[in-house]
Image (cartoon, grey):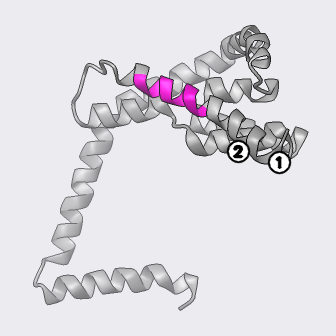
């Protein structure tokens, strides 16, 4: 079976299975779509606020100031200075950190220490603020309690382990 036919075949199988089980397929689909729009409507304010905050940080130059302040400490700990912006941006913006990852590949190469460390970092961290905003708001949770601290600690641990893993694996 070719890739182009997979999704239509899958949809056909679901419809046929639903008809065999005597499920009102279209009505069930419509109800699910309606529920999806309700979820989207409830998440929209949180996502808009997060996107505005990220764009304000980028536009104001605050991210550059923070990166320049943190870079000397990061370098002294063995972090390549090229990945510091990615470490700081990854919990806030997946798209922004992916753009930084692409820039690292272009400027230093994917096989460089910075490129490999950034690759491990991209695969082992989360867009923490986005995930908390989406999941907690969809569940109606207002207080994030210790979730943010634990999630940021996990992201920082992933950054440290990304450097250590690349150093031990590739012998940099």
**Do residues under tags 1 and 2 come within 8 Å of each other at their CB atoms?**
yes
- Residue at (71% x, 12% y) in the render: 70
Q: Secondary structure at mark 1?
A: loop
SS at mark 2?
helix
Residue denoted by label 1:
110
Label 1 – label 2 distance at C-alpha? 8 Å
* Quarter where residue 165 is shown: top right
User: Badge 2 is on which residue?
Assistant: 119
Indicate left or right for 144 with 4 as reference: left
Residue 170 x/y as whole percent: 81, 46
Q: Main secondary structure of the magenta part?
A: helix
Relative placement, left or right, of 51 versus 60 is left
Question: Is 56 covered by the magenta stretch?
Answer: no
Q: Is residue 133 above or below residue 77?
A: below
Q: Indicate whether 20 appears above or below 125.
A: below
Residue depicted at 79% across the width and 18% down the height: 75
Work out whether mark 1 precedes mark 2 in sequence or the reverse, and give the earlier one: 1
Please name whichever residue, 45 or 65, is drawn nearer the observer in this view of the structure. 65
Q: Which residues are magenta?
A: 150-158
Q: Alpha-carbon neighbours of circle 2 within 10 Å: few (<14), some, or many (≥20)?
A: many
- Residue 153 x %, y %: 49, 23
- Which label was assigned to residue 72? none
């Amino acid at each position: 079976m070719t890739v182009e036919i997979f999704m239509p075949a899958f949809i056909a199988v679901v419809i046929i299975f639903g008809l065999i089980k005597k499920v009102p397929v279209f009505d069930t689909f419509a109800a699910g779509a309606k529920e999806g729009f309700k979820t989207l409507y409830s998440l929209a304010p949180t996502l808009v606020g997060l996107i505005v905050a990220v764009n304000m940080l980028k536009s104001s130059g605050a991210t550059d100031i923070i990166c320049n302040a943190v870079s000397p400490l990061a370098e002294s700990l063995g972090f390549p200075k090229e990945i510091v912006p990615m470490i700081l941006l990854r919990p806030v913006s997946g798209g922004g950190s992916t753009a930084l990852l692409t820039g690292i590949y272009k400027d230093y190469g994917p096989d460089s220490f910075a490129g490999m460390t950034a690759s491990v970092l991209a695969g082992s961290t989360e867009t923490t603020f986005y995930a908390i905003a989406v999941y907690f708001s969809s569940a109606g949770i207002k207080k994030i309690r210790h979730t943010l601290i634990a999630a940021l600690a996990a992201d920082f641990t992933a950054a440290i382990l990304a450097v250590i893993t690349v150093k031990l694996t590739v012998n940099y």
